[in-house]
Each structure stands twice: as structure tokens, then as C-alpha cells.
Image (tube, grey):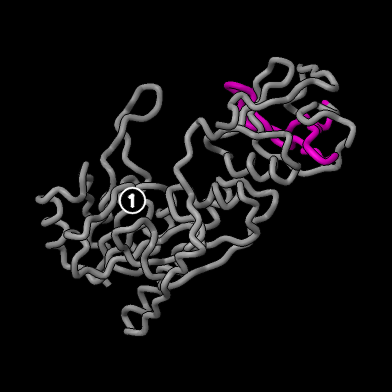
């Protein structure tokens, strides 16, 4: 099949790779190059870099600008595949085209920009990918297919992102094959079951130790690697990257460092989280025991996130 691929973020990279191997990618449409790094060097999106010279690449500031719209619609293609593109495709652009979107949740749960983060923060046990048609309302299209994956309590949002991205190609290829064979199945989303996954910002980078350990663990993992949760311990800034739930001390005030050597922090109900992996400012991620070298935290020290709940 001839495919037009719309994508910008790394989530779509495994699927684009598979499409280039097994189909003809007639064009890749991605966001414009942006300044990146300390030297602000113009850098292509992950999808733009992957496409390279393999396929023609368009980088329009607005995909719905009339001249760009006409250029894309003039491309002979059997299907359009949209994954983490970053621009809304207008009705005029989509008219009479078979266009599908790979979304990283089991829709209608977690419609929106950050479904993976919200699934982890909510403590969901199962998530997955959905392939849907594109409509005017955000992520509200018909569901053509789903894949499922269990969320392990040790997984961060960054790790789950990569796993779901790796699951994407098989599901997209399945839907394209069904389209080719004329055997597509469509499922309406249950609007009564919709939950929203709003875009995250640095203002969301907090944890509340007055919640129980499982809730604290889920929030820290759901915000790793970005925006991250930075803790203040004895005046030092430490970014918590990976933790586990543990037994605490029911008599201990929430948000106290119970045991510096094991990184045990008190939460509600006599529960606690244990810091497993952390990062000092300007440093690399490392096990808690390694980060402790050269630092002397006091038992009972107050632990709180630098950002506060809004």
C-alpha cells in the first residue's frame, strides 16, 4: 500500500520503520525543525530524522494551510497513518481519505495529550494502544482495533512509552491489512466512560506524601522522566526517578525520611515509599545507595516536593 505518514514524536518511530520496510511511504509529514540544546541548533523531529532520504518529507508550520493541504491531498495514497503528529488535521484535509490514528490508551479511557502518564499516575493495571478514525473531537473516532499491555508497578511512564511504541507496528499493520481485504470492523466509543489525559507541565511535578504509598509511587513513576518530581531533603534537591511501596511506621508523620540508608519516606496509613533510583542536579541517574555517597541525610528529615499541588 502507498502510505502518507503524519508524525513528529518518537512514539511513531517503530511504526514508521515497519511501514518503510513493508509498504511504500509516499510522503512523511512532520513538524518543522526546532532549536534544541544549549547551542539552539535547528534539529528535526524524531520522525523527520528517521525518514531522512528514505521518503519525501514535508515540514509545514500548518498542515491545513491551503497550499500545503492541496499538496498533501494530491499525493496518491491508499491510507494516511497519523501518530503523535502535534497538529490537528482539518475536515477539509481529511475529506474522502482513509486516515487512522494510533493512540496510546484503551479508548475511551485517557483521551488527550498525555495518556501514558495519566494511566501510570492513576494506578491503572492495564493499558494499551487503540487505532481510531479521525474526527473533529479529540480522540473520539471509531475504534478499529486495540492491543493491551499490563503496567508493572516498577515501570515509569518513559519505559511504558517505549513498550507501547513497540506494540504499535503490529496493530497498525493489522488494520491496514484488514482495509486491504475489505474486512474492517468499527466500534463506537462509550462516551459515558471517557476520561481525559490533559497535557502536563512543570506545575504538575509534585507528590503528596499525605497519600498512601501506592498513590505516591504511581505519581512519581507517571511523571518520570518528564516533568519529574524533585524532592527537598535536608535542603538538598533530589529528583526521584524510581520508587517502590513499602511498610512504614504508623506513628511517623507523613513526609519524613524514616531511614536515610534505604531511602524510606513515610506516607499515609503507615505506608512508605523506598527511593530506588534518583538524580542530583547536574548528575546522572543512579541507585539511591550510590547517590548517598558523600551525603549525610538525617533520620526524621522533612521530605517534600519542590512543586506543590495546584
Observer-nearest residue: 190 or 282? 190
In this rendering, the answer to whether 70 lies above or below 114 is below
Residue name at image x 31 percent, y 69 percent:
23
Observer-nearest residue: 294 or 229? 229
Q: In which quadrant of the rendered image does the N terminus lie? A: bottom left
Q: In which quadrant of the rendered image does the C terminus lie? A: top right
Residue name at image x 31 percent, y 63 percent:
134
Residue name at image x 34 percent, y 42 percent:
45
Identify the residue under disc 1.
Answer: 85
Tell me where residue 211 sits by quadrant: top right
Q: Secondary structure at mark 1?
A: loop
Residue 143 locus on image (x, y percent):
41, 70
In this rendering, the answer to whether 223 lies above or below 292 is below
Tell me where residue 127 sits by quadrant: bottom right
Tell me where residue 233 sits by quadrant: top right
Residue 78 locus on image (x, y percent):
24, 71
Residue 285 drawn in magenta: yes
Residue name at image x 69 percent, y 25 percent:
304
In this rendering, the answer to whether 276 lies above or below 178 is above
Q: Is residue 129 visible?
A: no
Residue 307 locus on image (x, y percent):
58, 26
Q: Tell how many labels.
A: 1
Disc 1: CA contacts within 10 A as few (<14), some (14-19) or many (>=20): many
Horizontal arrangement in the rendering, residue 4 relative to residue 178 (left or right): left
Observer-nearest residue: 158 or 246? 246
Q: Is residue 252 visible?
A: yes
The part of the chain drawn in magenta is 260-289
Taking the view exactly as shown, the residue that stands out farthest to the front is 192
Horizontal arrangement in the rendering, residue 63 relative to residue 214 (left or right): left
Residue 29 locus on image (x, y percent):
25, 52
Residue 13 drawn in magenta: no
Amino acid at each position: 500500500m502507498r502510505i502518507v505518514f503524519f508524525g513528529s514524536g518518537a512514539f511513531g518511530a517503530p511504526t514508521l520503520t515497519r511501514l518503510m520496510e513493508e509498504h511504500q511511504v509516499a510522503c512523511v509529514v512532520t513538524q518543522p525543525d526546532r532549536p534544541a540544546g544549549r547551542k539552539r541548533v535547528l534539529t528535526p523531529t524524531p520522525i523527520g530524522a528517521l525518514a531522512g532520504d528514505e521518503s519525501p518529507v514535508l515540514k509545514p508550520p500548518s498542515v491545513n494551510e491551503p497550499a500545503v493541504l492541496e499538496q498533501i491531498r494530491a499525493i496518491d495514497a491508499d491510507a494516511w497513518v497519523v501518530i503523535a503528529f502535534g497538529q490537528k488535521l482539518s475536515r477539509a484535509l481529511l475529506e474522502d481519505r482513509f486516515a487512522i490514528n494510533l493512540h496510546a490508551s484503551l479508548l475511551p479511557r485517557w483521551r488527550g495529550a498525555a495518556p501514558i502518564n495519566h494511566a501510570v499516575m492513576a494506578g491503572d493495571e492495564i493499558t494499551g494502544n487503540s487505532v481510531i478514525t479521525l474526527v473533529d473531537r479529540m480522540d473520539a473516532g471509531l475504534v478499529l482495533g486495540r492491543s493491551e499491555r499490563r503496567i508493572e508497578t516498577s515501570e515509569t511512564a518513559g519505559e511504558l512509552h517505549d513498550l507501547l511504541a513497540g506494540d504499535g507496528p503490529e496493530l497498525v499493520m493489522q488494520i491496514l491489512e484488514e482495509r486491504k481485504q475489505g474486512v474492517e470492523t468499527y466500534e463506537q466509543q462509550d462516551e459515558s466512560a471517557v476520561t481525559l489525559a490533559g497535557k502536563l507541565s512543570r506545575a504538575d511535578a509534585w507528590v503528596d506524601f499525605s497519600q498512601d504509598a501506592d498513590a505516591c509511587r504511581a505519581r512519581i513513576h507517571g511523571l518520570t522522566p518528564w516533568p519529574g518530581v524533585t524532592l527537598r531533603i535536608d535542603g538538598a534537591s533530589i529528583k526521584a526517578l524510581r520508587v517502590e511501596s513499602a511498610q512504614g511506621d504508623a506513628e511517623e508523620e507523613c513526609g519524613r525520611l524514616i531511614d536515610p540508608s534505604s531511602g524510606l519516606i513515610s506516607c499515609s496509613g503507615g505506608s512508605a515509599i523506598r527511593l530506588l533510583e534518583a538524580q542530583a542536579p547536574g548528575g546522572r541517574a543512579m541507585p539511591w545507595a550510590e547517590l548517598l555517597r558523600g551525603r549525610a541525610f538525617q533520620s526524621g528529615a522533612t521530605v517534600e516536593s519542590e512543586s506543590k499541588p495546584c
